[in-house]
Image: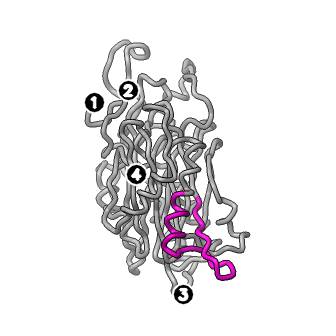
Amino acid sequence: MTTNDKTELQNWARGSITDVAGITVGHHTDTHGATGCTVVLCEGGAVAGVDVRGASPGTRETDLVRPSSTVQKVQAVLLSGGSAFGLNAADGVVRYLQENGVGHDARGIKVPLVPAAILFDLSTGDPVVPSPDDAYDACKVAARERPNEGSVGAGTGATVAKVLGRAGFVKGGVGTAGLVLGNGTTVGAILANNAVGGVHDAGSGRLIAGPRLIAEHSGDDGGMADSMETILAPDWEPPAMPAGTNTTIGVIATDASLTKAQVARVAAAAHDGLALAVRPAHTVHDGDTFFALSTGSGSTVTPTDLDRIAAAAAMCVAAAVVRSVTEATGLAGVPALGDL
């Protein structure tokens, strides 16, 4: 990989999370309300881990997937808009799985286990939130094909590059990426990018999506600012932005057979990719959360294999972040890159 080709990272990790055996993805998109949800199904069960780095997260069932928990596998992960209200949508995923006889076996009763994370999109369109029925519908259309990206699902109302206030926002969205390692192991990521920070290509460092420069800040309309440089400037005045109104949430999956401790390390590595592509990441206003899933059923991996899987997870996240903005379309008055 060279450092002067802004698209090379995307070409290298050109697959998707559904390349991982046992993973399907479905979206529900509400363009009028500028919200939606995305479900990642692993009906055969997957060993799960989580890593929460943002200071303002909104999550469900994260304790269930920590290494100290006795439960080994989950059957789905939900990513949703709607802020804390959107966590309720996970009930629709539980209902879908229950109707299909899928879940953790608890004395003969199948109990679906569905961790979830949300992002804040209530100020993008009408203040509506994804419902359990919406998430149920997302489950019904979940498929092995490459998921749609951009302003769909949990990324429908997502925006990025917010350090100069609402007038400078750029449209965010859903992105996915995947790759196959030399030993045949597949790693993939899907995320919904609603970050405070701007987006950079991890291979070249080039700014892809920064806050739009407007006359109020630059004296002239046009162009984009570097969010990190903007925040570090001595005259920067932060816009009114309550904590918890931004975040990047996502899922990493692999067909390698990982323990709960190992899959937690992969979830942690996903944040390395986020920091490569979103600058700054993990702010007090973000709730950055990544789940990791292992669908494999073979022998556990070596430490060297785990390092490779973790590195692949970071690269897939970085590539998916770029796709989340390059594939987005403008919505609710917020332009996408293609509109600028």
Q: Which residue is mark 3?
A: 299
Secondary structure found at label 1: loop
The crowd level at tag 1 (other Cα within 10 Å; few <14, some 14-19, many 20+) is: few
Specify the amino acid type for callout 4: His
The disc placed on residue 135 is none
The disc placed on residue 28 is 4
Secondary structure found at label 3: loop
For the residues marked 4 and 3, what is the alpha-carbon distance in whole angstroms? 36 Å
Could you tell which of marks 2 and 3 lies nearer the N-terminus? 2
Could you tell which of marks 4 and 3 lies nearer the N-terminus? 4
Q: Nearer the viewer, mark 4 or mark 2?
A: 4
For the residues marked 4 and 2, what is the alpha-carbon distance in whole angstroms? 29 Å
For the residues marked 2 and 3, what is the alpha-carbon distance in whole angstroms? 50 Å
> Residue pushed farthest bottom?
299
**Residue drawn at (40%, 33%) of the image:** 210
Secondary structure found at label 4: strand
Whether residue 330 sits left or right of residue 92 in the image: it is left
Could you tell which of marks 3 and 1 lies nearer the N-terminus? 3
Specify the amino acid type for callout 3: Ser
**Residue drawn at (42%, 22%) of the image:** 167
Q: Which residue is mark 1?
A: 340
Q: Nearer the viewer, mark 4 or mark 1?
A: 4
Percent across and percent down for residue 96 are 49, 65
| Disc 1 to disc 2: CB gap under 8 Å | yes
Q: Which residue is mark 2?
A: 212
Q: Is residue 76 magenta?
A: no
